[in-house]
Amino acid sequence: MDENQWPLAKEGFPFLIPSLLLALAMVVLGWTLLFAIFALLSLFIAFFFRNPKRDVPDLENVILAPADGRIVHVGEAQEGRFLKSPALKISIFMSIFDVHINRSPVNARLVEKSYHPGRFRIASAEKASLDNEQNALLLETEEGLRIVLVQIAGLIARRIVCYTKPGDRLRRGEIFGLIRFGSRVDLYLPLGVKPTVRLGQHVRGGESIVGYRV
């Protein structure tokens, strides 16, 4: 079974199983308060690592949100890692209550990826794009459209997960990784892309359209 079909991200099971076992042990021992604590912890873990089914739009020339969260930046910015040119930058802040699974915004091949250690500033701050620990992916579509997607750790996040490697092909809406406990995703698109989102808007990864290729 691939990552798109699990109801829970596989990274959550090492946290969820011990919590459930401890809750069960508290029932056996008759320790009601501790059972309630571990039961609530189990519910939070399942909630955080949830992998809800998404209806991926079957439309031409659309670019999808790579993550759930709030749009904190839409505008032109320099992308110096791969594109080395001005680009349309769309940033999504994922709070602790958002789904933290990341999905491919387009059908594309992963050309290159680059990991950089860094700081753990609050992910909604613009400086997080420069200073924080991050993992950058260069995607290229069959039409030659090149997109950069950056997973950025946040104030609480301490692990970026990326399942893919250079040469892999991703389907639009396909899961390629996640970030734990509050984070951010930056999307760099060609300037010809028409954005369809605004600051403060909440989007759903693999489902919400953030732009159109023209």
Image (cartoon, rainbow, N blue to C red):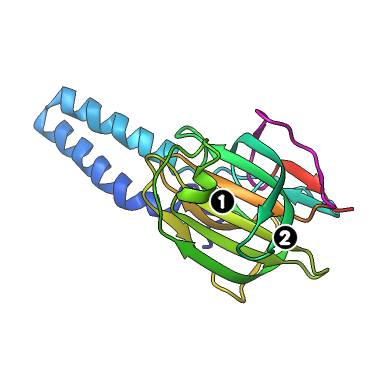
User: Which residue is denoted by mark 2 in the rendering?
Assistant: 85
- Mark 1 Cα shell of 10 Å, populated few (<14), some (14-19), many (≥20): many
Residue 192, image x, y percentages: 85, 52
Residue 53, image x, y percentages: 60, 45
Residue 32, compared with residue 198, is above or below; it is above
Q: Amino acid at mark 1?
A: Asn
Choose top left, top right, bottom left or bottom right for residue 150. Answer: bottom right
* Callout count: 2
Q: Give the residue at the far left of this rendering.
A: 29
Residue 180, compared with residue 106, is above or below; it is above
Which callout, 1 or 2, points to the residue nearer the camera? Answer: 2
Q: Residue at x 45, y 58 (%)?
A: 161
User: Which residue is denoted by mark 1 in the rendering?
Assistant: 102
Q: Residue at x 61, y 48 (%)?
A: 186
Closer to the camera in the image, 96 or 89:
89
Residue 170, image x, y percentages: 65, 65
Report the side of 34 relative to 146 (left or right).
left
Report the side of 199 relative to 2 (left or right).
right
Q: Amino acid at mark 2?
A: Ser
Q: Residue at x 31, y 52 (%)?
A: 14
Tell me the element at label 1: strand
Closer to the camera in the image, 176 or 148:
148
Q: Is residue 51 in view from this perspective?
A: no
Is residue 171 a member of the stretch shown in magenta?
no
Report the side of 34 relative to 75 (left or right).
left
Q: Earlier in the sequence, mark 1 or mark 2?
A: 2
Closer to the camera in the image, 83 or 136:
83
Residue 214, image x, y percentages: 90, 53
Q: Give the residue at the far top of this rendering.
A: 33
Please report the bounds of the magenta region as a residue range. 192-206
